[in-house]
Image: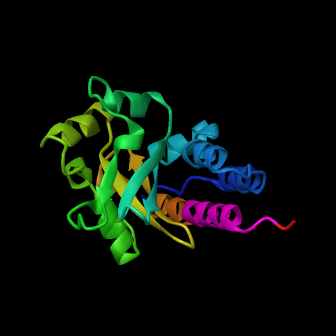
Amino acid sequence: MTNAAPDLSSLYAGLQDAFAEAGADQDSLSQLIVEAPFAFEREAGLLFLGFISYFLVDEAGQALQLIGVTDNDYYRQSVQGYPFAVKEYIVPLTATDNSLIQALHEGKPVVSTNWESLRREDAPEGVARLNQASGGIGYSVAYPLTGKTQGALLFNYFGLPENIGEPQDDFMARYAKLVERALARLAEPVAS
């Protein structure tokens, strides 16, 4: 007997509406990107979605910088007791052993079941794995943003890889497209 895919139609309709009404500044859009799916608690739960991290490429610095993270208990638990500042998570674009950088270079999602693959070069070994365990995250996907504005989303899920499948893949693909379109609108010059 196979499990039926969850009905996520209300999630997709709500996200379409939220992004259609998105603010025209980077800060409000960044907040929307990391928080919007969690306004749909039931659907986020059906997806086993814990939290989302949002990164942008800093072309001048040739690095990927963390811009925002979902502000929920799961994220806070993952960094509890660890001095972590969002703006200090910066990874050089040359760090090809990092899953986020791999996703950017390859232009396709990269799965991580061990956050050591997301660790900054200057972070102590083992800390990222402890953070992952503290947040209860078993499966993460670095999803590249390939539009005009380059970056990545990190989708962090509860559960084991065998519990992640088509519903999550569909969600990530749709959500990344919504984000790319919103970022493209933000980058468009304002007509005077």
User: Residue lying farthest right?
Assistant: 192
What range of the chain is rendered magenta?
174-190
Magenta span includes 53: no
Q: Is residue 41 left or right of residue 140?
A: right
In the displayed orientation, state which residue is furthest to the top: 81
> Could you say which is closer to the camera, residue 30 or residue 33?
30
Instruction: State the predominant SS element of the stretch in magenta.
Output: helix
Residue closest to the eye, 78 or 185 = 185
Q: Residue furthest left?
A: 125
Q: Measuring 20% from the left and 64% from the top, which residue is drawn there?
A: 97
- 185 lies left or right of 85: right
Residue at 40 percent of width and 28 percent of height: 76
Q: Could you say where residue 32 lies in the image, as x and y percent from the top left?
A: 63, 45
Image coordinates of residue 59 in percent, x first then y, are: 43, 66
For image coordinates 62% across by 44% down, the residue present is 27
Q: Along the line of sight, which residue is nearer the eye, 108 or 49?
A: 108
> In percent of the image, x 51 and y 61: which residue is there?
172
Q: Position of residue 112 (x, y in %)?
A: 28, 57
- Residue 158, can we see it? no
Name the residue nearer the viewer: 5 or 32.
32
- Report the number of numbered marks: 0
Q: Is residue 179 magenta?
A: yes
What colour scheme has been applied to the protein in the rendered image?
rainbow
- Residue 92 point in image, percent of width and height: 29, 60
Quarter that holds the N terminus: bottom left
Q: Which image quarter holds the C terminus?
A: bottom right
> Vertically, is 122 above or below 82?
below
